Image (tube, helix red, strand yellow):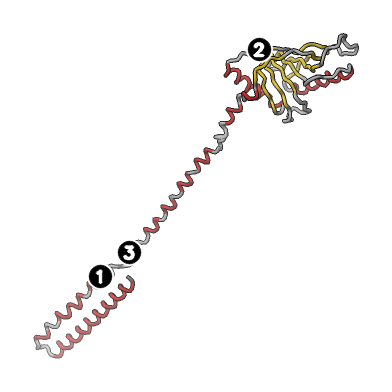
Amino acid sequence: MACYRILRRLALITAVVGGLTGLASTVEAQTATPPAGPATPVPPPTTPPLAAPPPAAAPVPTAPPPTAAPPPTAAPPPTAAAPPAAASPPAAAAPPGAASPPAAAAPDASPPDTSISQTMTLQPHPVVQVSGQSTWDEGFKTLNDSFTKLNETLAKANIKPTGNPMALFNETDDAGFKFVAMVPVAAAPEARPADLPADISFGQSPGGKVMKFQHRSAYDDIDSTYEAITAYLDEKGLEAKNMFAEEYLNRTKASDDNSLEVDIYVFLK
């Protein structure tokens, strides 16, 4: 196309130059022999060269069409590829947030998993026991001290424990709780040992129908487990007595030790 335009422009220039040459000769002829009438017809031929201006319309194929190239600037539609960024909403599905939404998993964590809870019947068995009371803040230390005292007493009497220590909670309020700390033994001695402390005695652990739950975390976090247990009992329509017990599968020295394992028994009506 460019060659074609150049050829047209060269033709136009040639035509214009030819016209000017013809015009000059005509003017010269007119000035030389003014009388000659035939010289006047000469101008008509000169007009065709003037008609050459139509080729000047050659500017019509002005470069503007190339300037129409801006349509490629319509390339911004590719920037419309931003919609893939809208695919980020699926990322919101991750939460995650979600999980959550990863957060939706929290409701599952609130009620105890039925796979770690079960209905069973506790059978009474011989124990050495001591009663006490404590505030909630001092509860972990008070219970630990009670178990230590019981184990030392059994060691002095040459009696071996036969199971894990347990605490029976028989009264609670906002200030604290009353409890009976127990350590199971094979059998109570026929006679009370002479050096047995006055506040320690032999007896039987409680028995009956219970729901068993698990707490596998620090003792500081056990309140959240009880809240979950309460929600679970309400959901199942189960009625509990005002009595529950904790069996300590292991003992820890600090209340924030996450290695603690506790089985909780809720006595049902």
The mark nearer the N terminus, 3 or 1, is 1
Q: Which mark is residue 65?
A: 3
Question: Are discs 3 and 1 less than 8 Å apart at CB?
Answer: no
User: Which amino acid type corresponds to the residue marked 1 in the rendered image?
Assistant: Ala
User: Which amino acid type corresponds to the residue marked 2 in the rendered image?
Assistant: Lys
In the rendered view, would you say 42 is above or below 3? below
Question: Residue 237, how many percent across, how many down?
Answer: 58, 15
The mark nearer the N terminus, 3 or 2, is 3
Cα separation between marks 3 and 1: 15 Å
- What secondary structure is marked by label 2? strand
Q: Which mark is residue 157?
A: none
- Left or right of residue 54: residue 130: right
Question: Residue 115, how many percent across, how many down?
Answer: 63, 25
Cα separation between marks 1 and 2: 106 Å
Question: Are discs 3 and 2 less than 8 Å apart at CB?
Answer: no
- What secondary structure is marked by label 3? helix
Cα separation between marks 3 and 2: 92 Å
Question: Residue 24, how many percent across, how many down?
Answer: 20, 85
Quadrant the C terminus occupies: top right
- Looking at this view, name the residue that lies furthest to the top: 191
Which mark lies nearer to you, 3 or 2? 2
Mark 1, residue position: 57
The mark nearer the N terminus, 1 or 2, is 1
In depth, the one of 145 and 192 nearer the eye is 192
In depth, the one of 259 and 223 nearer the eye is 259
At horizontal 15% and vertical 90% (from top left) the residue drawn is: 32
Question: Residue 52, how many percent across, how many down?
Answer: 22, 75
- Left or right of residue 55: residue 92: right
Mark 2, residue position: 241
In the rendered view, would you say 131 is above or below 214? above
